[in-house]
Amino acid sequence: MINLFENYNQDSWDLHYSLILSGYQNTTIAINDNGFLPDDVTSPFLFFTGFVNATGKPLHFNEIPVPKFWEIKATNSSGEIFDLNKKRANIHFSKPSHNRFVQSVDWLDEAGKVRSTDHYNKYGYRFAQTIYNRESQAVQKSYYDKSGKEVLVENYVTSDLILEHEGKIYIFKSKADFVTYYIQASGYDLDRIIFNSLGMPFLVKYQLHQKGEDVLFWQEPIGDSLPYNMQLLLDPAAERKTKIIVQDFKTYEQILRMVTPEQREAFTYVGLLYPFQRDNQARKEALILTNSDQLDYVENIIEDFPDMTLHIAALTEMSSKLLSLGRFSNVHLYPNVTNLTVRQLFGRCDIYLDINQGNEILSAIRTAFESRQLILGFKERMHNPRYSAPEFFFDLGNYASFRDKLRNVLGNRAAITLDLQSQYKAANLAMPEDYRRELGQPKPALPEVEDSPLTAQSDRTVPADNMEAEANAAETVYEEVAEATRDLETTDVPVDDSAGDTPADEPLQEAGAALTDPAQVFEAASSQDYQPAQIQAEALLDAEGPSFTVDLTVPVSTDDTEANDFSADALKAPDLLQTEQAEAHTKPSVHLEPNELAEENQD
């Protein structure tokens, strides 16, 4: 059984994580490779270029080879290369971008149009190069091995691929033919293919021409009718039978209204498992992450809830308007917030207020969800409906309802516990037993998880014998909720607020870039060795080499989405917490959002 994903984005990461926590440690293949796949994910390009067991570190921005006297400039999110005043290239960083590891460099012609792109992997090698025509349309992509030898050429005009492997030349008429050859030649167990796209994975599955029982995890919205490829999967005469598991309940209900009673048997619903970091303690502390000083009703909230401590953090300097809120004794401000402080704030606060008018930063909503914070706000400002319960978002003109809801849950453990169930439902929370019911009992994993290499941002793996314990822990979430709320009224539950003034002992993952590989999902509770990222000015080289300029006016940021102010990869990085991708990254560590994924997948 294998997992076959077209792109390793946030949706793929979530599914991969859910499968592993449920006991299915399948070989995972990403068809498109951006060079920064997690260590437990492979690809046909990774295999044929010989980087499967490679070692090394990502290329730092100041290590890009350039002619003498050219200058490299970089900020937290991107970089540029100049020849005097003439811009020659744009640099794109992997996620998280503040590390300034190079993922690709777009070289420009005299007119400023992109004519070629050098692609770098997490080992610091240039593993691919894309060539563009005068209209900046990609026409060809070459892949290289460690020695720089061209081993694979993909022609975007004719769709042909030419592979040189073990002294032989192979010509494939399409990318689907190439991937099919790779999967069959690699000797993978193809009795079942788990996939989440009706694009390339569907074509590969269709071309195998061998029996099997596959599973499509449908993670997209549905239109007015079933996609044509999905209809083909429902054909009783299909060579490989396919079960379709829909991961959004509203989409599942919509599909059931479209299909015949006979076709309904092919569909079922199973949500996702998430890497929750802690329990909600109902402390009277709320958090806002913003790069904007436009916060709806913020002064009303501060004055109406004097017993609630409001923490407001920004990646940048704060305007005088925001700084003026410091006059209130129950407000704490964090301009130029560090990664460590963000982690502590997510561990300390139990309510997140989604009321800022600007873009979401640091994948705040996903991180708040994983922190089991109750997310409240206004409909007009909702930044990520995927992890927010709609009943906790109110019309912007209806502050009274928002205030009443906040007053009802503030410090009320039973009320928050009940409301978190609505939040879980909105995010389609599942349990390991749901996957086992639909997929059957998992086979014992052959490789030991502890023998797998660590990823760039992880210092610990989860031994295989601990996976069952982690899965059992995830299964008890609903039982714990039921036990906590049994026979309790939402208005008379005593709450101990004594812990409210102390940051949590287990800081969360770095916001927006903290999820580890699915096989390494639970980091140690304490991370005393953690150091916040810092900008370091690069020393100028001698006159014979290029010079480097770092913009120190840009604060260190874990902001990894283009939509957030999560740049194209990552994620996502990673895409959340892929980004993205996560595009999402050295691992499934960045939470990518849908509008970023398309850009990430354009090599």
Image (cartoon, rainbow, N blue to C red):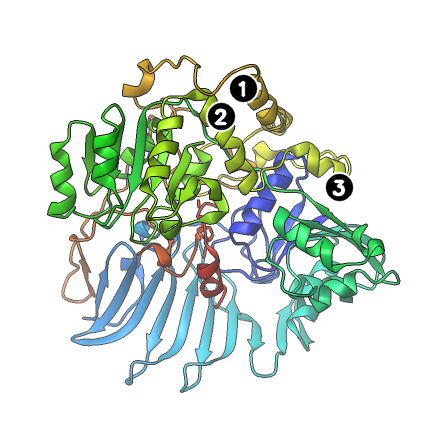
**Amino acid type at mark 3:** Leu
Which of disc 3 and disc 2 is earlier in sequence? 2
Is label 3 in contact with label 1 (beta carbons under 8 Å)? Answer: no
- Callout 3 secondary element: helix
Q: Which residue is mark 3?
A: 439
Residue at point 66% right, 37% down? 447
Residue 301 visible at all = yes
Q: CA distance from mark 2 to mark 3?
A: 31 Å
Is label 1 in contact with label 2 (beta carbons under 8 Å)? Answer: yes
Q: With 528 as the anchor, is 460 left or right in this view?
A: right
**Amino acid type at mark 2:** Thr
Mark 2 or 3, which is nearer the eye? 2
- Callout 2 secondary element: helix
Residue at point 77% right, 67% down? 207
Q: With 108 as the anchor, is 538 left or right in this view?
A: left
Mark 3 or 1, which is nearer the eye? 1
Residue at point 70% right, 38% down? 435
Residue 507 visible at all = no
Query: Nearest the camera: 197 or 354?
Result: 354
Q: CA distance from mark 1 to mark 2?
A: 7 Å
Q: Which residue is mark 2?
A: 417
Is label 2 in contact with label 3 (beta carbons under 8 Å)? Answer: no
Residue 336 placement (x, y as % from top left): 20, 43
Which of disc 2 and disc 1 is earlier in sequence? 2
Q: Which residue is mark 1?
A: 485
- Callout 1 secondary element: helix
Which of disc 1 and disc 3 is earlier in sequence? 3
**Amino acid type at mark 1:** Thr
Residue at point 46% right, 62% down? 600
Residue 132 placement (x, y as % from top left): 44, 80
